[in-house]
Amino acid sequence: MSDVEETPVRIDQDETRSMWPFLVAAGVIAVVILGIVIAALVSPVEKNVTDSDRLSVAAVNFIKSRSDAGKNDPALTCQGFDENASPLKIAAATGRSVTFDRLADPAVDGDKATAQVTVTVSGAQSTSTWHFSRENSRWVVCSA
């Protein structure tokens, strides 16, 4: 045992502490959040969608419309659409199920576009050139 006694260290707790560091941190966080909100308003997600994405949506909606018996939605086709020249004419005639696989090589020229659309008809893949037209700011499927 030691005869040396430890002297207690006195801690000065009378000093008042400043709130400034916390207020500055909260201000920085508020500025970052405000910047994110402004960026989202200036550049909404809808504007980040490509024409290829929009053409794919038009093709998928057209296929779904034709797959549901009796639900051919004329809003998904361009004016003057000829059912006899439809890209899904063969599948519609046989009553087979059709699923969308992919859209490739989109070529957009103003309000007209073409793309290679691959579909699966009763297990067999088929690729053909589809024609699209932009009507009322959205893409629709055309017969030619």
Image (cartoon, grey):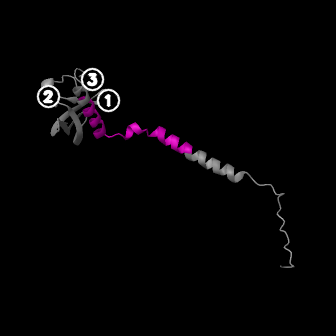
Give the overall secondary structure of the magenta segment. helix
Packing grade of label 1 (10 A; few <14, some 14-19, many >=20) is: few
Q: Is residue 103 above or below residue 83?
A: below
Q: Residue furthest front?
A: 1
Identify the mark at residue 75; answer none if there is no mark: 3
Q: Relative to 4, does residue 91 appear above or below in the rendering?
A: above
Residue linked to disc 1: 137
Badge 2 or badge 1: first in the primary sequence: 2
Front position in the image: 48 or 118: 118
Q: Is residue 20 above or below residue 52?
A: below
Find out whether the residues at labels 2 and 1 contact each other: C-beta distance under 8 Å: no
* Quarter of the figure that contains the C terminus: top left
In percent of width and height, residue 10 lies at 84, 65
Q: Position of residue 74 (x, y in %)?
A: 24, 22
Q: Is residue 39 magenta?
A: yes
The magenta span reads 33-62
Q: Give the residue displayed 56% in from the left and 42% down from the top.
A: 34
Amino acid beneath label 2: Lys
Residue drawn at point x = 56 percent, y = 47 percent:
32
Q: CA distance from mark 2 to mark 1?
A: 26 Å
